[in-house]
Image: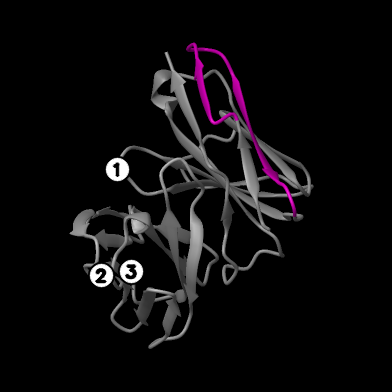
């Protein structure tokens, strides 16, 4: 149980285009989902916390107009990278928590999306 | 700035060796510490959630200890097997509901 899928697993896009990444909890309802970004040999950096039915909470330094997050249902959150540029190339990974936000619960991760902007 | 350090960055061991690595975190505002195992091309999977100073958790050949006063946790693997090859992440959770990940220790177990 507690499977999270992420789509696509990799994507290559041209500079200036937008890319949407989906994160789905397959067998549980996720009131809270997290979006992370990872650069090579670095740690997972939290970008934003997404709560179903409300606006996402962005971490300091993350542009909310550039990284649009929508958590429209209890099983789906999307991250849209708008007007992508080469510096947005990175590994993006989501996670979900099945209960109300509590950091005593483990996070269930998707497999990640590798974004390359040319 | 809260920082979580993991060492070593990578580790190569022979099958059957026992090994351990470290996660260092701030000793203040501690709420919980998580260990995750992340195999290549798969999703990170939770190993342990630790909350109390002196906690020791065990799952099969893998165990972990926690010292919140000095700000470190050790992960031990007894009798390493090739299938243990993965990146091991620790995540420090603060009372302000922030989770900060370390960069991970990449373990390679050679048969």
Horizontal side, residue B110 vs residue A112: left or right: left
Few, some or many C-alpha atoms within 10 Å of disc 3 (few <14, some 14-19, many ≥20)? many
Horizontal side, residue A18 vs residue A26: left or right: left
Q: CA distance from mark 2 to mark 1?
A: 20 Å
Horizontal side, residue B64 vs residue A75: left or right: left
Few, some or many C-alpha atoms within 10 Å of disc 2 (few <14, some 14-19, many ≥20)? some
Whole-percent x, y for residue A79 in the image = 62, 34
Whole-percent x, y for residue A1 in the image = 68, 58
The reply to the same-chain question for discs 2 and 1 is no
Q: CA distance from mark 3 to mark 2?
A: 17 Å
Q: Can the viewer see residue B102 in this picture?
A: no
Lower sequence index among marks 3 and 2: 2
Q: Is residue B27 above or below residue B46?
A: below
Location of mark 2 (residue): B20
Q: SS of the residue at dot 3?
A: loop
Q: Which stretch is magenta? A: A8-27
Closer to the observer: label 3 or label 2? Answer: 2
Q: Can the viewer see residue A111 in this picture?
A: yes
Q: Is residue A77 above or below residue B109?
A: above
Whole-percent x, y for residue A93 in the image = 52, 42
Identified at 33% across, 69% down, the residue is: B25
Toward the front, the furthest residue is B111
Q: What is the chain identity of the residue bearing mark 3? A: B
Relative to the observer, which residue lies in front, A72 or A55?
A72
Whole-percent x, y for residue A17 in the image = 56, 14
The reply to the same-chain question for discs 3 and 2 is yes
Q: Is residue A21 magenta?
A: yes
Location of mark 3 (residue): B25
């Amino acid at each position: 149980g507690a499977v999270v899928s992420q789509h696509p697993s990799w994507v290559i896009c041209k500079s200036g285009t937008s890319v949407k990444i989906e994160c789905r909890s397959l067998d549980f309802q996720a009131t809270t989902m997290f979006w992370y970004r990872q650069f090579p040999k670095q740690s997972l950096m939290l970008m934003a916390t997404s709560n179903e039915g409300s606006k996402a909470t962005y971490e300091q330094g993350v542009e909310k107009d550039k990284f649009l997050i929508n958590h429209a249902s209890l099983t789906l959150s999307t991250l849209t990278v708008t007007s992508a540029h080469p510096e947005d190339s990175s590994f993006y990974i989501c996670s979900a928590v099945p209960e109300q936000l509590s950091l005593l619960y483990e996070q269930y991760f998707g497999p990640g999306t590798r974004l390359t902007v040319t | 700035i809260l920082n979580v350090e993991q060492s070593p960055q990578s580790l190569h061991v022979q099958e059957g060796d026992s090994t351990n690595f470290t996660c260092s975190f701030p000793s203040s505002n501690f709420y919980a510490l998580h260990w995750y195992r992340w195999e290549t091309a798969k999703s990170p999977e939770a190993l342990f959630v630790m909350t109390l100073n002196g906690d020791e958790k065990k799952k099969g050949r893998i165990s972990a200890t926690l010292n919140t006063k000095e700000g470190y946790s050790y992960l031990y693997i007894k009798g390493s097997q090739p299938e243990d090859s993965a990146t091991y992440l620790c995540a420090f959770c603060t009372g302000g509901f922030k989770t900060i990940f370390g960069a991970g220790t990449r373990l390679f177990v050679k048969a």
